[in-house]
Image: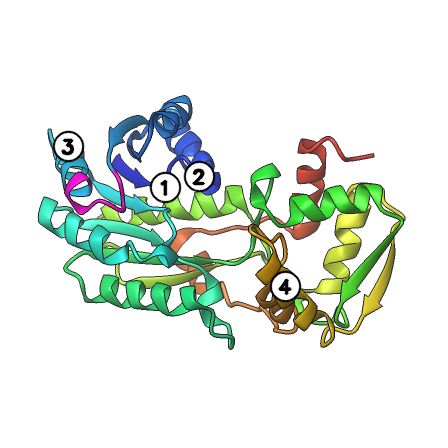
Amino acid sequence: MRLFVLGGSGFLGGYVLRAAAAQGHQVLALARSAAAADAVKARGAQPVAGDLGDPARLDEAFALAQAPGGCDVLVCLASLGFGHGPAIVAAAEEAGVTRAVFVSTTAVTTALHPPAKQVRLAAEEQIRRSGLDWTILRPTMIYGDAGDRNLSRLLRLLARTPVLPVPGTGDCLHQPVHVADVAGAVLASARSLQAQGHASAGGLYNVAGPEPIPFGQLLRACAGAVGSRTRMLPVPLAPLVPVARGYERLSRRPRLRAEQLLRLAEDKEFAIGDTIRDLGYAPRPFADGIAAEARLLGLAP
């Protein structure tokens, strides 16, 4: 296949580009800067200059990606939470792209109302109304190596701290997904769109781990992966939220947000039966994935 990838220089993009190259696909990837161009080139893709925030440059990039011969599938890994969705859909339709895989997130199902939720839902709705043969993937929390921004931090913390305050009861369910499994689902979706019958066209799929696990069990698996004997100290969630909000107001780049704490009180359990059926999806167990991440980070005992 000939793929045009948006977001190829990011965390998930690295896995998708390397897997696509290993499978023999021809991959072009949007690059906003020289650094991004170098990154996608190192991952086996041909960079195409363009900027999601500049409609004119984006149209030019799509025109380049379509010639000669056109791209078989557009793969959008770039976050839909920054408001670029309408421009991407418009540029794709203008360039004559017919098939597209978009990566969204299960975070749009939260009962909370962060600003990005409505932006993402509006983008999904525009994709549905478009003339594209589309597939939307909604991954849960992605983990797998140093770029995941979530469990890699937790593993490092568990490797060095004797006591860890744990907000909430630890009973709420989580269903993290390994980044390589998400990349596999992305490429399976692209293959399905290209194939006769378009099995995944018009499909919205959850991309999650094989089963939900309580947060306490997740913590124990992470601790085991790094050989940690950290004592988990439960802390009531309610008084932590206003503290986190104050920290957000005072910090330029807060490493913890009140919304993240509140999300710990929500079950994050997602059915993946249709993903397994239509995309041949087979996610690895969390214990295996987190142990592999600990080894990759050099934290395994």
| Front residue (pair 277, 122) | 122
Q: Secondary structure at mark 1?
A: loop
Q: Is residue 52 magenta?
A: yes
Q: Position of residue 118 (x, y in %)?
A: 37, 70
Query: Looking at the image, which is closer to me, 269 or 263?
Result: 263
Q: Are marks 3 and 2 in contact (CB under 8 Å)?
A: no
Looking at the image, do the residues carrying marks 1 and 2 touch, with CB atoms under 8 Å apart? yes
Q: Amino acid at mark 2?
A: Gly
Give the amino acid type for the residue marked by disc 3 in the picture: Leu
- Please give the residue where the numbered disc 1 appears in the rendered image: 7
Q: Is residue 27 left or right of residue 63?
A: right
The earlier-in-sequence mark between 4 and 1 is: 1
Residue position for label 4: 174
Q: Is 293 rendered above or below residue 130? A: above
- Front position among marks 3 and 4: 3
Q: Residue at x 56, y 56 (%)?
A: 141
Amino acid carrying mark 1 in the image: Gly
Q: Report the mark closest to the observer, 4 or 1.
A: 1
In the image, residue 122 sits, relative to residue 69, either above or below, namely below
How far across and how far down the image is residue 199, in percent? 29, 57
Residue in the picture at 76% in, 46% down: 157
Position of residue 192 measured from the top left corner of the image (x, y, whole percent): 30, 49
Of the two numbered discs 3 and 1 on the same chain, state the one appearing first in sequence.
Answer: 1
Specify the amino acid type for callout 4: His
Quadrant in the picture for the N terminus: top left
User: What is the spatial separation of the Cα atoms under label 3 and label 1, in whole angstroms?
Assistant: 17 Å
Going by the image, does 172 lie left or right of 200? Answer: right
Query: For the view shown, which residue lies furthest in the front direction?
Result: 250
- Segment colored magenta: 51-57
Q: Which residue is mark 3?
A: 64
User: Which numbered disc, 3 or 2, marks the residue that appears first in the sequence?
Assistant: 2
Give above or below for 76 relative to 123. above
